[in-house]
Structures are given as structure tokens and as C-alpha cells.
Amino acid sequence: MHYKIIDIYQKGFVIFGGSGFIGKPLGQELARLAPSLIVSRDPFPKIHPYGFVQIDPTAQEIVAFNPVFASLYPNYNVWTANIMLPEKFMVLASVLYSLNPIIIDTAGVTDVRTSTVKDLVQDIVKTAMLCQLMSPPQRLVFISSTEVYGYSADPNNVFSEDDDLSGLPINKEQLTAISELIKYQVKQSILTQTLMDINPIVSKFETYNFPARWYYAIAKRISETLVLEQLNSIVLRLSNVFGAGAEYLQPNKVLSVFIGKAFLPEPKFVLQGDGGSTRTFIHLHDVIEAIKLASLSNVKGIFNITNRDNYISILTLAELVRDNFNMQVQIACQGSHDNDYFQFDTTKAEEELGFQSQKSLKEHIENKAVDY
């Protein structure tokens, strides 16, 4: 098999998850700074919204560009590839070895409710393979989630990066066992040049009987462990991301659900308990700025990325959507439900990365309503 590899003529970016909600606009933005290779496991559509045209959905090729888009973003290149396939893995290894780019991993499942253990294990394995590909000086930016903190029943609790993550139903021994098994399986796949067998990892994951509610968070936590073993790595834990089409691309998120239900013939929001549970939100624009800061700095470790001003209860969020989209919406609270509270300290990101979030959730909802 022959591969067409676009020459990234100087150190640039390699972004995994390029077809995703974060990866697509991130690639467009970073291409303004340096040559960027976007790697996506899923084939791009024939005509991508950003304007490039795929040569052949089944070919092991990088895509060609629409001339107009290419003139605006000449550094934006896309490769459809599942790096779990040995032949793709080796091509990517040669690219990373020869070019020494900054690696940004945004890839991962987006529909947490329907994801299986196998889906999540594949995500962890992808991250483990990236870690194997890297040479020590290379920069790796891993996009994680504040879900890894678990939950808190204390309304005054503020999660910081130093917390021990005791809110997750996984202990250190289990975390180590799964991580070591993944690293072993990845190394065997590379040595033998065979497609990796993830079934032992899936079985190990399932033997611990983790609650399905926490599959996604546990998978992210395991990936973080693998990433932080690298010498030049940084982990960004994002809270709930909104903006720039999130309502369509993340249909199961609470804000998307409320906006969608506001247009039903008899609109009604049903909240669990008294609606006092809280969430914290951050706009996609702020996320991209944080990733740029992390990519271009030498800072290492874990950082919370959110907007503390967008801390809001579910009930208040429901009322905000109702008041701006459809005053006919009924809001009902039902059942007994212990409230959980998710707010996060961003002092570390502000002081060490210079991160400042800017976009308001309230203003976004008000402006979105005008669009409709």
C-alpha cells in the first residue's frame, strides 16, 4: 500500500479528532499559525463544511482541497485514518518522527449515553498509541473532561486539579492494572505489526463492574494517566462546552435538550428533584484559545478549563431557555433526587497559562433565540 503524505514543511500541529466538534474549528484556527495535519478516524463527507473535497472515502489518502478554501487556509491538511490499523500507525509514526510537531488529542466519543465499553477502550488505546509514537521532547496536549472529578453533594465544593478524584468509582490499583494492560497490548501490536486485540482490555474493564454512568469519566482518567507519563504533556479538563453549533452536534447535552424541547407542540421541561443540581459551561471559542495557549507553552500538568461565571443550576438554565425561546414552556420538578454540584477552580490555568474565559452562557442563549 502506498500513501500520499503531505509535506509539513516545518514544525506544525497534528490534531486527532479532526472531524469533531472541537477538532474542526481548532484545525482551522491553528492552520493560521503553522502547517496542520488533521487526523480523523471517521471518513469526512464528500463535501466538507469547510470546503475541502475528499478524493476517495476508501483510499488511504490525504484529501485534496477546494481551491477557494485552500487559498484561505493553505496549511490545513486532512488524513482519514484509524491509527489502530498497523499500516496507518507506521505511516503516522514516520510523520511524527521526522517532523516533531505539536500533537493535540481531541478525539473521543461524544455520545456518552450510548457509548459502550468497547468504544471507550478504543479511545484509550488510541491515546496509548500516541504516547508510544512520541519522542520525549514532543508536546502532547490531551483534551479531557471535568467529569473525571466524579460528583459532589456539597454546594460549596470547588474542584481543583489537586483533588484526589475520590468521586470516581475506581481505585488506584484498578487504574494501574488497566493502564499497564493497555500499554502491554499496544507494545505487542507494534512489535508484531498486527491489529491490536482490545478484548482483554474490555474484559478487564468489565470485571470491575463500574457503574455505566461513569464509564466515560473513568476512560478519560485512564487516558490522563498514560498521557502524564510523557515528559512534555499537558491535560486540559473541559466542562460543558457550548456554542458554534453545539446544539446540533451534542444533542444529548442538557442545553441542547432544553432548546430542542422548547419547540415541541406542548413544550415541557421535566427536572429531577428540585432542579438544584448545577453545571458549569464554557464556550467553544474559549476552549480553542485555551488549547492554543497550552500548545505553545512549556507548562505541564493538569488544568481546569471553564468559565466560573457560567456556573448555573439546572432550574435556572431551564428558566433562561424558556424566557428566551418560548414562554409557553412548562417546567416541572419530579421525584426525589440528591443534587450534585459541579464547579471548578481555574486559578491554575489563569496564572500559569494566562487563560481568561470571555463568553457568557446567558448572552449566548439570548443571541441564539434571536437567530431562531
Image (spheres, helix red, strand yellow):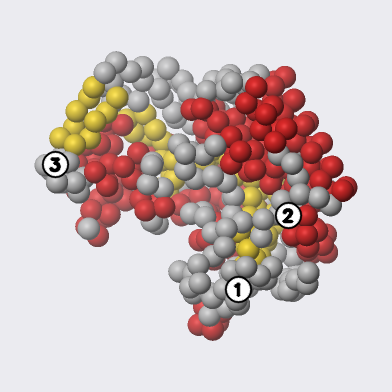
Q: Residue 55: image x %, image y %?
A: 60, 76
- Labelled disc at residue 266: 3
Gap in angstroms between the C-alphas marked 2 and 1: 18 Å
Residue 253 position (above or below residue 47): above
Marks 2 and 1 in Cβ contact (< 8 Å): no
Mark before the other along the chain sequence, 3 or 2: 2
**What SS does tag 1 mark?**
loop
- Asked if residue 258 can be seen in this view, the reply is yes
Looking at the image, the residue that sits furthest to the left is 328
Q: Quadrant of residue 340?
A: top left
For the N terminus, give its image quadrant: bottom right
Look at 87% across and 48% down and name the residue there.
192
Question: In the image, what residue occupies the spot 61% across and 56% down?
Answer: 41
Eyeballing the image, is 274 above or below 307? above
Badge 3 density bin: few <14, some 14–19, many ≥20, Cα 10 Å:
few
| Label located before the other in sequence (2 or 1) | 1
Circle 2 residue: 85
Nearer the observer: mark 3 or 1; the answer is 1
> Which residue is label 1 attached to?
56
> Type of residue at label 2?
Leu
How many discs mark residues in the rendered view? 3
